[in-house]
Amino acid sequence: MNKVYLYSWLCAIIPVICSWEKGDGYISIDLIRQKTPRMQYLENPHLADKMGFGEWFHKPKPKPKPGNDSIALYRFLDYEFYAKIVIGHPGQTMNVALDTGWTLSWVLSAKCQVLTTPGCWFHNMYDHTRSSKYKKDGTPYVGNEGKYNLTGFYSYETISVAHSNVTNFRFVEMDNVPWTYLFSKVDGLLGLGIRGPKDDEPFFYALHRENNITNFLFSVYMNRDRQSTHGGNVILGFIQDKHIHQTQFKNGTKIHDKIKFLPVEPGQYWKFSVDKVTVKSDTNDTDITTLCPNGCKAISDTSSSTITGPEDEVDKIHELIKAQKFPFGGIWTVSCTSVNKLPEISFVLGGQSFKLKGPNYIIRVRIPLIRTLYFFIYSWLLANRVLSIQNVLKNTTYSHLCIALTLNMYKISIGTCLIN
């Protein structure tokens, strides 16, 4: 049975020159940054309300024991990074999210009913009648979230990244998606989750199966500069050591920091244990509040920019950073002048503390006719004390994220990476 390595650490991105790169046994994919649907709604709230869509953003938090589809659908508000793929022959270019929360891969279908599905507006839509490589499957797919459904049907097609192809790849053509895709440049996603016995084949599994990558792993590097549309890179089959933080000695010797290894629990999500979370007082370094004191589970996720956690403990963080609830969007705000003075939040993993200062866990957003706001964004995942620290390991709270997955043994590693 295959096992999995998941390496995650906070790191910086060194800009790349080209969008696609194929090396000896690895593939590099350029990531492009967009404003998330949530942020675009905050900048254009009246547009959504006039169209009758505003209730989505005021939608109640998920009910206990949500299924995988409902959790993934709830995250659609937070897609920030996407990459380009080519599907079919002749090729059709699509913008896709690369999501560690899904094993399934899908794209918007030309069969989408645009008159009744605003989520398909202004998107690239795959037309299988134009492709000589298309093969029919036809099995229906439904991701149920009440009236906010994902529906479609399975097909087989050739998908290309860089100069590598995956042939006869089984994916879903979505013909109905939530209206929130109106705000997104994403036309679909490539699943990078852990495959279970009944799951769809994730895309990078297929790349390895067809010998397009030598090592059964992928790495994700995300750019800390939010003013840049260059979001980072996904490197399939390789890890770039240059992103790992290193210490340089007077004699010129450089030593990379060690990476902390933690076990990953089997399942679709990259889930591991957190020892505790501590919040240091902004006035007294010895005054420390401990959250999750008996340990909790965390999810490393490349698809969302929200912090998700037990309600009472997230509320405690709000209190400690003096955050105020914003009227809409499921977010909290802090004073713009206080960001550099906010309490230090530390996540203790495997006995090692990973510290975050105010600028690392706060997002700066400009809203027309209001002012510049600084958001602490969170959502709820009502499970058995599951704390999703996707902000810590991804695109909001940290300096940068690097993830490397290797299917050999269930492990996750956390470390500190080079910051430019």
Image: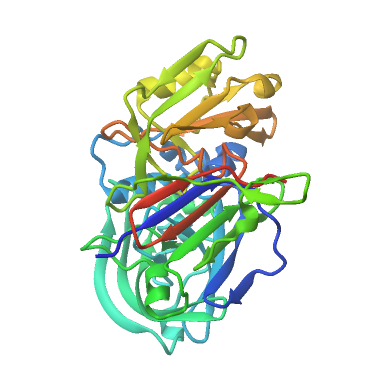
| Residue 302 coordinates in the image, percent (x, y) | 48, 50
- Report the front residue among 82 and 409: 409
| Residue 35 coordinates in the image, percent (x, y) | 60, 48
Quarter of the figure with residue 315: top left
Q: Residue at x 35, y 32 (%)?
A: 60
Q: Residue furthest left?
A: 198
- Report the front residue among 57 and 392: 392
Q: Residue at x 65, y 34 (%)?
A: 364
Q: Is residue 368 above or below residue 192?
A: above
| Residue 313 coordinates in the image, percent (x, y) | 39, 22
Quarter of the figure with residue 384: top left
- Tell me if I can see residue 307 in this picture: yes
The N terminus: image quadrant: bottom left
Q: How is the image coloured?
A: rainbow
Q: Please state if 410 lies on the left or on the right of 213 as rendered.
A: left
Q: Is residue 278 above or below residue 43?
A: above
Count numbered badges in the picture: 0
Q: Residue at x 44, y 77 (%)?
A: 127
- Report the front residue among 73 and 406: 406
| Residue 158 coordinates in the image, percent (x, y) | 43, 81
Q: Residue furthest front?
A: 251
Q: Please state if 404 lies on the left or on the right of 157 as rendered.
A: right
Q: Please state if 347 lies on the left or on the right of 293 as rendered.
A: right
- Tell me if I can see residue 186 in this picture: no
- Report the front residue among 54 and 306: 306
Quarter of the figure with residue 221: bottom right
Q: Is residue 10 above or below residue 166?
A: above
Q: Residue at x 36, y 22 (%)?
A: 293
